[in-house]
Amino acid sequence: MTDRALAVVRAGALTTVQDQGRPGHAHLGVPRSGALDGPAAALVNRLVGNPPEAAVLETTLNGCALRPRSAVTVAVGGAPCPVTVDGRPVAWGAPVRVPAGALLDVGAAVHGVRSYVGVGGGIAVEPVLGSRSTDLLSGLGPPPLTDDSVLPLGRAAGRYARVDGAPQPRPPTELVLRVSLGPRDDWFTPGAVRALTTGTYRVSAASNRIGLRTEGPALERARPGELPSEGMVLGAVQVPPDGRPVVFLADHPTTGGYPVIGVVRAADLPAAAQALPGIPVRFVAVRRRSGRPGPG
């Protein structure tokens, strides 16, 4: 039994293994997946000396607790949270050395939703289609963590950042999403398009890794019926029959038959990963898209 491993003492509400995802397989019906807050995942990897593609842990709301079998360097970023080693507070947003057998506890998020745990050497579960990411929609990759499970670790490079702390964006108190209208905005009334870009929505508690669901003005259709299924892209704003927009995130389906009124810019999606239920959401129109969305 290797000593390069983490024992999971407390799995938390939803903790998954994530890396940069598995792009390029939409034609097979496989979503991209990967860390919802990509910049936060990349930062914790840098802090512990990992390459950008190394797998990390993505926690949801209440963190997790881990016990390494050998001494490891860890860094926790993303949503701010208390971090302790054997009950003693240690730094968040900075590399921390955790002795073999010590209990690393990543606490509940103080702000935001998802924290990221980088470990020197990376989480070395078996890759599927070139990625170690857990995909909740397709079921590819390792299952979400459970208590008493064990995660293998890769070999650490031995170099990590010598910093007291790294600046990270504060989770949003209002989510502003820049959206390019189209390709199916003509399926909605002019009033519905105005409602999307001038009204205020709120993040729904039903949001998950597949999509950020919203509560607010229902968008009225100008056309009845449904589209034939067509390709869906990351950030697509799909409008189901209840009229409330859904912003597709990393585990989104690759095809869908509900019309897409617009597409959110990729740079705005990491903030969506940290948006708590109930906070305001504003869609800001930036330009019009043309043509049908391609798979992504």
Image (spheres, grey):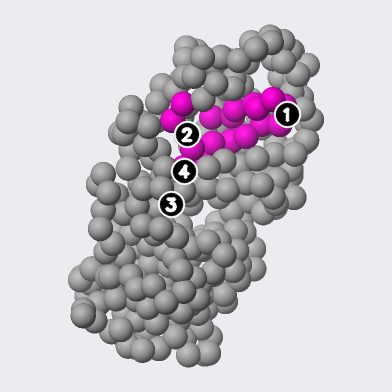
Instruction: Check whether the beta carbons of the residues at disc 1 and disc 2 lie within 8 A of each other.
Output: no
Q: Earlier in the sequence, mark 3 or mark 4?
A: 3
Q: Which of marks 1 and 2 is nearer the N terminus?
A: 1
Q: Which of marks 4 and 1 is nearer the N terminus?
A: 4
Q: Nearer the viewer, mark 3 or mark 4?
A: 4
Relative vertical location of residue 72 with respect to residue 123 in this rendering, above or below: below
Task: Give x and y (percent) for residue 251.
Answer: 46, 42
Is residue 244 found inside the magenta-colored segment of the image?
yes
Residue 20, label in figure = none
The amino acid marked with disc number 1 is: Asp
Q: How far apart are marks 4 and 1 (CA)?
A: 22 Å
Bin the neighbour count of mark 3 within 10 Å (Cα to Cα): few under 14, some 14-19, many 20 and up.
many
Name the residue tied to disc 4: 137
Decide which of 281, 296 is in the foreground and name it.
296
Q: Nearer the viewer, mark 2 or mark 3?
A: 2
Query: Which range of residues does the magenta coloring cover?
Result: 236-255
Instruction: Check whether the beta carbons of the residues at disc 4 and disc 2 lie within 8 A of each other.
Output: yes
Residue 242, label in figure = 1
The amino acid marked with disc number 3 is: Ala
- Which quarter of the picture shows residue 71? bottom left
Bin the neighbour count of mark 4 within 10 Å (Cα to Cα): few under 14, some 14-19, many 20 and up.
some
Task: Give x and y (percent) for residue 103.
Answer: 44, 85
| Residue plotted at (62% across, 34% down) | 246
**Secondary structure mostly taken by the magenta-highlighted segment of the chain:** loop
Decide which of 40, 117 is in the foreground and name it.
117
Name the residue tied to disc 3: 35
- Which quarter of the picture shows residue 48? bottom left
Bin the neighbour count of mark 2 within 10 Å (Cα to Cα): few under 14, some 14-19, many 20 and up.
many
